[in-house]
Structure formats: C-alpha cells, structure tokens
Amino acid sequence: MKIAIVKLSSLGDIVHAMVVLQFIKNHYPKIEIDWVVEKDFKELLEFHPDINQVHEVNIKKARKKKSLFLLINQLRKIRKFGSYDLVIDMQGLIKSALVSRLMLSPITLGFNKSSIRESIASIFYNKTFNYGYDENVIERNVALIGFALGLNVSKQQIEHKLPFLHSSQKHLNIDISNTKKNILLVPGASHKSKCYPVSNLAEFTTLIDANFLIIWGDREEKIMAYKIKEISPSVNVCDKLSIDSLISLISQVDLIIGPDTGPTHIGWALNVPSITLFGPTPGYRNSYVTKVNQIIESKSEVNTYKIDKNDNSIKDINVQEILKVSQDLLNQ
C-alpha cells in the first residue's frame, strides 16, 4: 500500500502530525508513506526513516501569482513518483484539501465539515471523518490515521511514544555545557500575545545556575533575544538555525522553555523536558502533557475557534511557577 499525507504547515502543526508515523509503521511495516509539505518546512521531514519521499509545494508562490496552473504543475511532478492508494489531508484547510484532491487518488480523506475551521475544505474529500475541532490536536491526528488505516492507538501509546524527529547535524558550533544543565529559551512566537515577556525570561535566568541558550527565527525575535542578553549578559544567543540544526540542538539540551510555538513542540517530539507557556491559546488542545513535558497556562478563558490576539494574559504567569516546574523537571 502506498499513501500520501498532506500536512503543509506550520512547524508545530507538522510536528504534532508526525507522531502518527511510528504507529502506522508498527502496524504496517511495509507501507510506503510520502508526505506533501510547503517548501519552508521540508527539512523537518526529509531525514525521517519512515517517510519514503518528501514532496514540496510552494503555495506562497502559487498564491502570489494567483496561478492554479502553477500548483497543478507542482502536483504533476509529484504524480511522476506513482499513484497513491490513499491521500490523507491532516490539515483541514482549503489549500491542503485542494492539494489532496488534485493528487487524483481513488480515496481522498479528511475531517468532515463540522471538524475543521474552514468547513468548505471538506467538499474536496470523498471520505470524511468526524472528530471535534476543539479536541486535543495530537489525539485528532492519531484518530484520523486510525480511521483511515484501521489502527487502534491508545492515549498511553501516545504518551509513551518514541522520539520521532531526526537531524543530519551531529556537531553544532554552539556552547553546550558539560558541567551545567543546558536550558533553551524560546522568546518568539507567531504573534506577540503568545510571547512571554523578555524581562521575565531574563529574571528567570538569574534564578537557576545553568547554561542558557536563546534561539530566534526572524528580526523581531532576534531583538527579543538580545534584550534578554542586555539584562542577563551570561546567556548565549545562538546564530539563526536551520530546522535541521534546531532539532539537533534541542536533542542536546536538558530543558526547553517557550510559548505555544514550533520549537517548543519539538521538545515534546524528542522527549526532551519542556515547559510550554500558554496565554491566548488552549493548552489542553495544543500540547500533550507527559512526565517530562509540562504546561503552564494563564487564567484566561480561551476560545479554541478564534485566537484573541489582544489577550496578553501570558504575562501574568509567575516566574516563580516556571522556576518550580523547571527544578522538578531538572531533578528527575
């Protein structure tokens, strides 16, 4: 059997979807799995041993040129690798549903209209699955794959998953300490209301004797990183990292702390101790709490279907609470 999974973006969403690979392979060792992803995130997938082929599409370019033909041409190149028995859209957006349908599989499967935010996407599927949009995203992904392939995966199996991200980078030019605990801080996120105040992060670095590393992805996040360093000069601000290098770095640290964003979720994927800080987004939905992966939420009432970008309640999370959870994780 040959299947294609469509999960185009973003970093954290793809990470939350990739957990299904090990459960598929456990049940069907000989199945061929290809993955369709937007160009910017290909590196997240291309070193995974359970993926036969990673296909990139450039939705941004097609949208910018307002060209459906350009998208069709990209998919035509994918079809040269052979046909698929099943295409599964794990994203549930109009763009991913369209990509899935244009791959011309006899079965195109996705969530039904009541289970996704962009309900019109469901018209592109010829087989649908119902699972509440406000349910945990990781359990949603596993349930969709279970429905598609006849698998039964328990919550305990998800909790005790194997690490599932892979890097080609063994040695990084980054100051990893051999004598102190290495704590990685993630100051940035997709919008400001998800970001924990840099002054609080800087204060936190003074409360634990550890080697602190800070990562960033764009200009604004770089400014945030260096603001922390201005307050706490001993921290180490990393150079901009590729996704491949980021996976390698996170695999080597003792703890990662950040908001509801891709790099923090990579910690969960690698079974590295992590603390995810939640303000305007739902912690129960966007994370999977384990013995080593913890969350701290603000007291905000969150609407799962619509993020309030004016909700800055994440700033109310107490630094001492982060300190306590950190100490518990580092002492395990």
Image: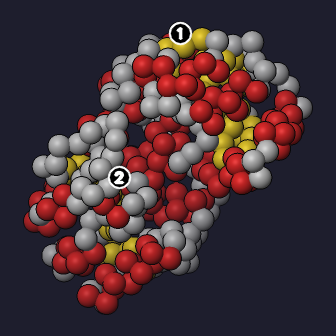
Q: Is residue 294 found left or right of 213 in the rendered image?
A: left
Identity of the residue drawn at 72% across and 41% down: 54
Frontmost residue, 205 versus 124: 124
Q: Say which residue label 2 marks.
A: 260
Q: Position of residue 285 (x, y in %)?
A: 31, 36
Mark number displayed over residue 308: none
Crowd tier of the residue under label 1, counting other residues whose Cα lies within 10 Å: few below 14, some 14–19, many 20 or above: few
Frontmost residue, 31 versus 62: 62
The amino acid beneath tag 2 is: Asp
Q: Position of residue 186 (x, y in %)?
A: 37, 66
Identity of the residue drawn at 54% across and 13% down: 128
Identity of the residue drawn at 75% across and 47% down: 66
Frontmost residue, 94 versus 166: 94
If you read the primary sequence from the N terminus, does the residue marked by circle 1 or circle 2 appear first?
Answer: 1
Q: Quadrant of residue 109?
A: top right
Kind of element beneath mark 2? loop
Mark 1–mark 2 distance (CA, rounded to whole Å): 31 Å
Identity of the residue drawn at 43% across and 58% down: 190
Q: Position of residue 60 (x, y in %)?
A: 68, 52
Q: Say which residue label 1 marks.
A: 150
Q: Is residue 58 found left or right of 80 in the rendered image?
A: left
Using the rendered image of the protein, determine whether residue 25 is visible from the camera's viewpoint. no
The amino acid beneath tag 1 is: Gly
- Classify 202 as above or below 285: below
